Amino acid sequence: MNGVHDMGGMDGFGKVEPEPNEPMFHADWEARVLAMVRAMGAAGAFNIDTSRYYRETLPPAIYLASSYYKKWFLGLENMLVDKGLVAEADIAAGRAVQPAKPLKRGKFAVSDVERVMVRGKFGREASAPAKFKPGDKVRAKNIHPATHTRLPRYARGHVGVIERDHGCQVFPDTAAMELGENPQWLYTVVFDGTQLWGADADPTVKVSIDAFEPYLEPA
Amino acid sequence: MTSHDHDHDHSELSETELRVRALETILTEKGYVEPGALDAIIQAYETNIGPHNGARVVARAWINPAFRQALLDDATNAVATLGHVSRTGDHLVAVENTSNRHNMVVCTLCSCYPWELLGLPPVWYKAAPYRSRAVKDPRGVLADFGVTLPKEAEIRVWDSTAEMRFLVLPMRPKGTEGFSEEQLAELVTRDSMIGTGFPRTPGAPS
């Protein structure tokens, strides 16, 4: 979706402001939110792509005005309600007043913690040969899916070169919508800065994205 | 700021805290999460991950050419051979800075970051200024960090748009001949592994 989360190339957000000696969390509740998202994801309530999609679908004004973990919290709450795992009545009461629903992988236990600290594996068997190889010129398609996609707007319609082949991986566009993993070939595609940002752009800049095969066409 | 604004800010913060606490109560009461499991996750984040892991990887690459090559060829497997670094999972790519090429990592769409090697990302990495400008004006972003590159150096920005995670292998600082791996690791900053900074130079104030 063409949401405000797709920020690459936007102007007006001001300077980057690094915080010296930044703490891991700025409030205790941020840590609780992180832990709830990790636990409920590991319990099978949602996949990582769905959780990203729920943050992207927050109203733009709320997305921009909310801190990072506030977005995580709002996305989590919406997702659990939509899946029927938490009822509006539970939230209104501040405690469980409706019965629980079964989780795909069951209750998240202390013994599951080690598992969530290792990144998931997204590589999958290929069902078809790769269409592109390193060195091929490709164009990022001019597509505007209304739902989740990982093709940033700034790359669409532009010509780049395949630099790396990462094998077949879970396709976020379908996984986020719970339409299956639908594995697709994934490539690093590199673009000249002047291709993306015009003739006046810094000629020393190159930008790459990781693009799934359905995002690309020969150029 | 008027006292009214102050009260307003304060009550908004409290509202978020209350809502977070309520959701945790609900998840626990419904039996979705075992009591103590969330504390264990937070504790694991606070102790197992952080830039010290990435710094070990960089220092090893500086000192051991075979490891450096293995890291650039297949970072996931190379890091897995370092027993003292916590498990990283798949899909890691290391990209090397040279005198004429500087790498910088961003996630314009959300906040993708090599957590296991660098810890949780800092706020600026997840915020709009960095995400919006890194791909269009990387030299301007580097200036915000006080970093200047030679005019002719290529800047390569890696936008983490899928599940691949990128670790910048910075250049080894001058004046570190004879340094041990542990001494070198002390010089490797988090930002130098994102590409928004350089490693510390020996003797310079940190």
Image: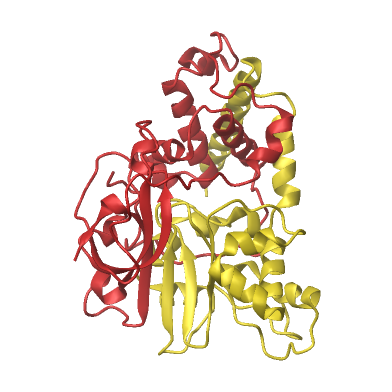
The residue sitting at 53% across, 14% down in the picture is A101
Residue A113 in which image quadrant:
top right
Q: Is residue A35 left or right of residue A102?
A: right
Left or right for B31, reference A165: right
Coordinates of residue B165 in the picture (x, y in percent):
52, 58
Q: Is residue A5 above or below residue A41?
A: below
A150, B121: nearer the viewer = A150
Instruction: Please state which of residues A21 and A161 is positioned toward the viewer in this rendering.
Output: A161
Q: Quadrant of residue A31?
A: top right
Give the residue drawn at x 30%, y 53%: A213
Q: Is residue A74 visible?
A: yes
- Measuring from the top left, give residue B53's x and y in whole percent: 70, 61
Chain identifier for the yellow-coloured part of the image = B
**Observer-nearest of A5 and A135:** A135
Tell how many labels. Answer: 0
Q: Position of residue B61 (x, y in %)?
A: 66, 75
In this rendered view, identify the residue nearer to me: B195 or A15. B195
Viewer can see residue A21: no
Quadrant in which the N terminus of chain A appears: top left
Residue A106 horizontal/vertical position (percent): 61, 21
Relative to B139, residue A13 above or below: above
Q: Is residue B196 left or right of residue A136?
A: right
Viewport quadrant of the C terminus of chain A: bottom left
The quadrant where residue B177 appears: bottom right
Q: Colour of chain A?
A: red
- Horizontal placement of A182 versus B29: left or right? left
